[in-house]
Amino acid sequence: MSIATELGVDADIVLYMKDPPDEATLREIISKLEDPPDALVRRDSTWKKLGLTEDDVATVDQIVALLVQRKALLQRPIVVTRDRAIVGRPKERVRELLGG
């Protein structure tokens, strides 16, 4: 989170593979998320290997269940403030959220 440091913002870094968010945390993030909820799910080689489709992430319940079961599919970085959350891609979004 060099952007947070650069802006002088205190940040807690959560290593999602070591300390993955639980169902309640994911639902809290989604409730604050400015992006569509399915933006939290990476569409990468694991997604393809599992044979997932957009129908598998059509609802919040499906998204939460998938991310609890398959933490590697969690998009990152996710930046969460007291009342907002974003997927931090591109990096300029993080700067906008924390600096403005």
Image: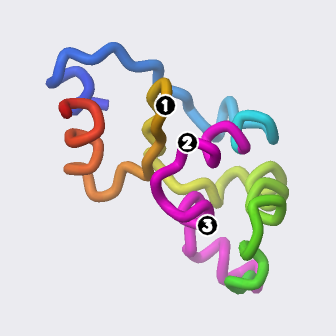
Q: Residue at x 61, y 66 (%)?
A: 38
The residue under label 1 is 83
Query: Which image quadrant for residue 67?
Result: bottom right
Taking the image as shown, residue 14 lies to the left or right of residue 18, namely left
Is 31 positioned to the left or the right of 87 in the image? right
Label 2 Cα neighbours within 10 Å, binned few <14 / some 14-19 / many ≥20: some
- Was residue 48 drawn as part of the magenta stretch in this picture? yes
Residue marked by disc 3: 38
- Say how many tags the image has: 3
- Disc 1 and disc 3: Cα gap in Å? 19 Å
Residues at discs 1 and 3 in contact (Cβ within 8 Å): no
Instruction: Give whichever of discs 1 and 2 has the lower sequence position.
Output: 2
54 to 20, vertically: above or below: below
Depth order, front residue of 33/75: 33
Does dot 1 land on a helix, a strand or a loop?
loop
Label 3 or label 2, whichever lies nearer to me, is: 2
Tell me the element at label 3: helix
Q: Amino acid at mark 1?
A: Asp
* Residues in magenta, as a range: 27-51
Query: 26 or 5: nearer the eye?
Result: 26
Query: Amino acid type of disc 2?
Result: Lys
- Residue at the outermost left position: 6
Q: Which mark is residue 32?
A: 2
